[in-house]
């Protein structure tokens, strides 16, 4: 026990004043903290839709059992994102033809040279891709070719463009969707069999099943593209990849392997090692760009 009677009056008054000031300061701090928290939550709730999304981007670029790496990737400069958006593309040189790695690199180099792209100019952007394809045709006359998948993300929306059988995958709410259709004989035969009321399983038995009916290197190719931009939401995952990825990791397997609290780098690493773990003796080259949409309050 302390005997405060030994303190003089001036010291006691000083202690009382100090205690009062401490209590006032503490109460003021608590009030300010509560007010700040309330205002932050109110602003976040009221303006959530106005806070734009940003792209967390990662990629992997792996050679499978092929002698050469025939996949090529392009990611637009991230410092241009606010004014021109993000463009991400994957081109896969066609197996069985010569110069696949040369053509795929020509495709991505050409896309780089034509950046930036108008987000609302889908037809003009498709015309750029068609011109690239015609240049390849003039050089090789169907002796070489490549696939192409490309996304353009701007202001929480996305357009995409596609030629061939590579993949544009959207993962949302634990469900994966292939956004583009594969321009190969399987797709064509399934459509014809379905129209005739026949079993579509027979399409997969055809030896031409994986043969492409359109690609970069075809004259006046038919570019798939979005007619209207699609809205992206927070935590959407967009994967732009060659078919070497999905040959070993189908969509449901990708969803089951990734964790949705991972960032883009973690997701890319998980998919890459998932493909490698399959130990496919005929593994094609496998490359992908992974984009995770994150909320920004800046």
Image (cartoon, helix red, strand yellow):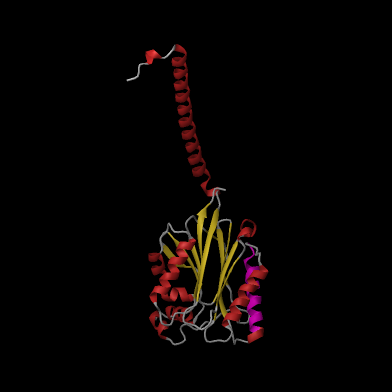
Residue 113 drawn above or below residue 51: below
Q: Which of 294/210 is in front?
A: 294
Q: Position of residue 179 (x, y in %)?
A: 49, 68
Image quarter hosting the N terminus? top left
Q: Position of residue 68 (x, y in %)?
A: 53, 82
Question: In percent of the image, x 43 and y 57: which residue is there?
Answer: 261
Q: Residue furthest front?
A: 6
Q: Which of 153/92 is in front?
A: 92
Question: In percent of the image, x 65 and y 80: which residue is there?
Answer: 134
Tally of numbered discs: 0
Q: Position of residue 36 (x, y in %)?
A: 50, 36
**Residue 206 visible in this rendered orientation of the protein:** yes
The residue range painted magenta reads 120-137
Q: Is residue 196 left or right of residue 124?
A: left
**Residue 249 visible in this rendered orientation of the protein:** no
Question: In percent of the image, x 39 and y 73: which residue is there?
Answer: 277
Classified by dominant secondary structure, the portion drawn in magenta counts as helix
Q: Which of 209/287 is in front?
A: 287
Q: Is residue 152 left or right of residue 190?
A: right
* Occupied quadrant, residue 258: bottom left
* Occupied quadrant, residue 276: bottom left
33 inside magenta stretch: no
* Occupied quadrant, residue 71: bottom right
Residue 46 drawn above or below residue 80: above
Question: In percent of the image, x 49 and y 55: which residue is there?
Answer: 234
């Amino acid at each position: 026990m302390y005997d405060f009677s030994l303190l003089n009056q001036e010291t006691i008054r000083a202690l009382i004043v100090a205690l009062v000031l401490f209590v006032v300061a503490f109460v003021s701090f608590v009030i300010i903290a509560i007010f700040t928290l309330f205002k932050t939550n109110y602003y976040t709730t009221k303006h959530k839709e106005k806070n734009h999304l940003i792209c967390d981007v990662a990629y992997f670029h792996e050679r499978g059992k092929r002698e050469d790496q025939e996949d090529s990737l392009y990611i637009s400069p991230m410092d241009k994102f606010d004014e021109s958006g993000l463009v991400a593309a994957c081109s896969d040189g066609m197996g069985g033809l010569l110069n696949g790695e040369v053509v795929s690199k020509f495709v991505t180099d050409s896309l780089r040279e034509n950046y930036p792209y108008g987000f609302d100019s889908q037809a003009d952007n498709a015309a750029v891709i068609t011109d690239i394809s015609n240049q390849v045709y003039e050089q090789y006359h169907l002796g070489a070719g490549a696939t192409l998948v490309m996304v353009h993300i701007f202001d929480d929306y996305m357009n995409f463009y596609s030629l061939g059988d590579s993949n544009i995958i959207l993962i949302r709410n634990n469900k994966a969707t292939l956004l583009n259709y594969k321009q190969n004989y399987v797709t064509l035969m399934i459509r014809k069999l379905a129209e005739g009321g026949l079993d579509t399983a027979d399409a997969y038995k055809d030896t031409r099943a994986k043969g492409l009916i359109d690609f970069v290197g075809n004259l006046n190719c038919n570019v798939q593209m979005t007619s209207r931009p699609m809205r992206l939401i927070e935590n959407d995952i967009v994967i732009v990849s060659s078919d070497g990825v999905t040959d070993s990791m189908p969509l449901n397997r990708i969803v089951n392997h990734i964790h949705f609290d991972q960032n883009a780098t973690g997701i890319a690493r998980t998919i890459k090692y998932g493909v490698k773990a399959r130990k496919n003796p005929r593994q094609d080259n496998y490359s992908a760009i992974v984009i995770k949409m994150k909320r920004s309050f800046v």
